[in-house]
């Protein structure tokens, strides 16, 4: 299957999705019950990748912690006012085994689903959690040496970061997996990457996952970088990712690695072999609502930007419909998804869902479809099916003041897309709550003396402009707050 330069990915919460299918069928749903019609619908929408979040087994220990944690339960109750114990399945990222949950049909059901996806040109992405395992992973009994262990003093000093367990017939103190900036995740245990045996064991787990899908999303991938690991745990470790990724690609040359990554570690993980890294910084700058930091972020080299995963929401972030006003949401989406990189969408986003669903739950609330958001995303996805945006070349454009003293030119983000086959598109966004004006410099001096037609493919506007003036002074823009254009450029004879 040929790799696209700029593919689109759709994240599906497997547990919640199968629960909804179960309601329609009147029986527990398996992966086999994700219908061919639904797969075909995802393909027609323009998605190349389907990420099935949470197919792996979770254990009774993790479920018990999820059900007994008071803070988590308060969150669950807010999401599901009619919450029941069966709704709390345990975090799908506290993996007890890299085997598909039997409630979903097991590994054979996943294999059949992948075959049906492949037949339709869809590629399957699954989770890999490198930093930790569930509390009741088999290694806890068979290989306690695989984990960071502590002392009674450690437990007393940092009870949120440690737990006492019986392992291999002995009582031991284990460290919870954690981000060093936050308390430990109480349903996990921290793997010890200072132990070479852990590298070998986790590579075997990664390889087993890779043989069952086309790509992996690696949870908190930066946590096992040697300097991060040593800074968190005081333990030196060898690099894991370069050798592991290289070895996987020797067997599976087209396999894709996506890193969840923060703390300005995106470039590092690109160099270690990841195809795409989360662009949380773009998301954060868009959420601030200021155009200039967004513009400056997009000045990065295109070779770097090509390998970023651009998103407006995912299972860890609040819903875009909650975080942004409707007008700001649409403007941010145009910037996000018409920039270079992997276009990353989250189930529910396209319908304007507003409730963030914790990864511990197996059910989400019913929400009405936001018709305006749905219409917008239908148009945007149609744009993203355009070969110019899937395979073309992107260039950030210069905007200049429309007249002396008019500062609103800084509110614009403008970019030019050009297909190797000759198509041209201009994307412009007034990313501000003010009406704004500017001239945007266009990049085609080789087309003088002609009439250009600019047709907005996200709207109905059509503009005819003389090319000599466009190329000498630029395209004049006067746009309302949060307005955008996606212009198909054609030269009239």
Image (cartoon, helix red, strand yellow):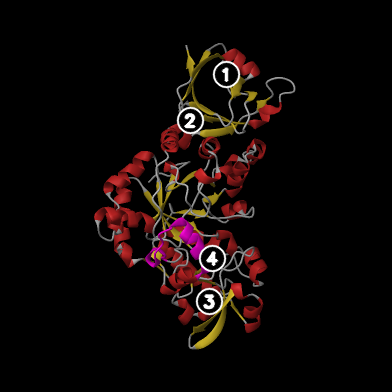
Q: Eyeballing the image, is 390 above or below 272?
A: above
Which mark, residue 420?
2
Residue at 49% from the left image edge and 17% from the top image edge: 491
Which mark lies nearer to you, 1 or 4?
Answer: 4
Disc 2 to disc 3, how far (Cα)?
51 Å
Q: Where is residue 281 drawn, in percent x and y?
A: 61, 47
Magenta stretch, main secondary structure, is helix
Task: Write the residue at 49% across / 34% down.
Answer: 392
- Circle 3 sits on which residue? 146
Circle nearer the N terminus (2, 1): 2
| Span highlighted in magenta in the image | 69-89
- The residue wearing badge 4 is 71
Mark 3–mark 4 distance (CA, rounded to whole Å): 30 Å
Between the residue at mark 2 and the residue at mark 4, the CA separation in whole angstroms equals 54 Å
Comes first in the chain, label 2 or label 4 = 4
Comparing labels 2 and 3, the label whose residue is closer to the camera: 3
Query: What residue sits right under mark 1 in the picture?
Result: 446
Q: CA gap, disc 2 to disc 1?
A: 16 Å
Q: CA distance from mark 3 to mark 1?
A: 63 Å
Judge left or right: residue 30 versus residue 195.
left
Position in image of residue 438 (x %, y %): 65, 23
Q: Vertically, is 328 above or below 103?
A: above
Residue nearest the viewer, comparing 358 with 403: 358
Query: How many other residues sit within 10 Å of disc 2, few (<14), some (14-19) or many (≥20)?
Result: few
Q: Secondary structure at mark 4?
A: helix
Is there any visible trace of residue 311 in the rendered image?
no
Quick check: marks 2 and 1 in contact, CB under 8 Å?
no
């Amino acid at each position: 299957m040929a790799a696209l330069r700029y593919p689109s990915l759709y994240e599906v919460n497997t547990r919640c999705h199968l629960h909804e299918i179960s309601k329609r069928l009147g029986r527990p749903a398996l992966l086999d019950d994700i219908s061919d019609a639904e797969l075909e619908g995802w393909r027609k929408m323009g998605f190349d990748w389907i990420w099935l979040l949470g197919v792996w087994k979770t254990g009774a220990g993790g479920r018990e912690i999820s059900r007994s944690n008071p803070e988590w339960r308060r969150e669950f109750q807010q999401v599901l006012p009619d919450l029941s114990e069966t709704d709390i399945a345990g975090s799908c990222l506290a993996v007890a085994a890299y085997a598909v949950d039997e409630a979903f049909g097991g590994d054979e059901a996943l294999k059949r689903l992948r075959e049906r996806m492949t037949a339709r040109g869809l590629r399957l992405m699954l989770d890999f959690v490198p930093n930790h395992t569930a509390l009741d992973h088999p290694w806890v009994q068979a290989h306690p040496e695989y984990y960071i262990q502590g002392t009674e003093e450690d437990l007393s000093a940092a009870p949120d970061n440690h737990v006492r367990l019986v392992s291999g017939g002995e009582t031991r103190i284990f460290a919870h997996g954690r981000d060093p900036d936050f308390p430990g995740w109480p349903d996990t245990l921290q793997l010890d990457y200072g132990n070479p045996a852990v590298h070998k064991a986790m590579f075997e787990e990664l390889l087993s996952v890779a043989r069952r899908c086309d790509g992996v999303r690696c949870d908190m991938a930066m946590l096992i970088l040697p300097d991060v690991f040593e800074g968190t745990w005081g333990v030196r470790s060898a690099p894991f990712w370069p050798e592991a990724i290289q070895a996987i690609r020797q067997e599976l040359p087209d396999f894709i690695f996506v890193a969840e990554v923060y703390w300005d570690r995106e470039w590092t993980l690109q160099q270690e072999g990841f195809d795409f890294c989360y662009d949380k910084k773009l998301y954060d700058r868009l959420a601030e609502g200021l155009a200039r930091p967004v513009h400056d972020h997009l000045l990065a080299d295109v070779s770097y930007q090509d390998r970023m995963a651009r998103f407006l929401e995912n299972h860890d972030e609040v819903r875009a419909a909650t975080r942004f006003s409707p007008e700001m949401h649409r403007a941010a989406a145009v910037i996000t998804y018409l920039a270079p990189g992997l276009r990353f969408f989250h189930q529910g986003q396209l319908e304007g869902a507003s409730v963030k669903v914790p990864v511990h739950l197996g059910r989400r609330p019913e929400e009405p479809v936001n018709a305006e958001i749905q219409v917008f995303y239908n148009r945007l996805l149609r744009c993203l099916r355009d070969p110019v945006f899937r395979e073309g070349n992107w260039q950030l454009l210069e905007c200049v003041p429309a007249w002396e003293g008019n500062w609103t030119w800084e509110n614009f983000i403008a970019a030019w897309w050009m297909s190797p086959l000759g198509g041209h598109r201009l994307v412009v966004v007034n990313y501000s709550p003010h009406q704004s004006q500017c001239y945007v410099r266009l990049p085609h001096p080789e087309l003088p003396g002609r009439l250009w037609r600019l047709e907005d493919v996200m709207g109905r506007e059509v503009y005819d402009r003389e090319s000599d003036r466009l190329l000498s002074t630029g395209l004049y823009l006067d746009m309302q707050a949060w307005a955008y254009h996606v212009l198909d450029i054609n030269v009239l004879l």
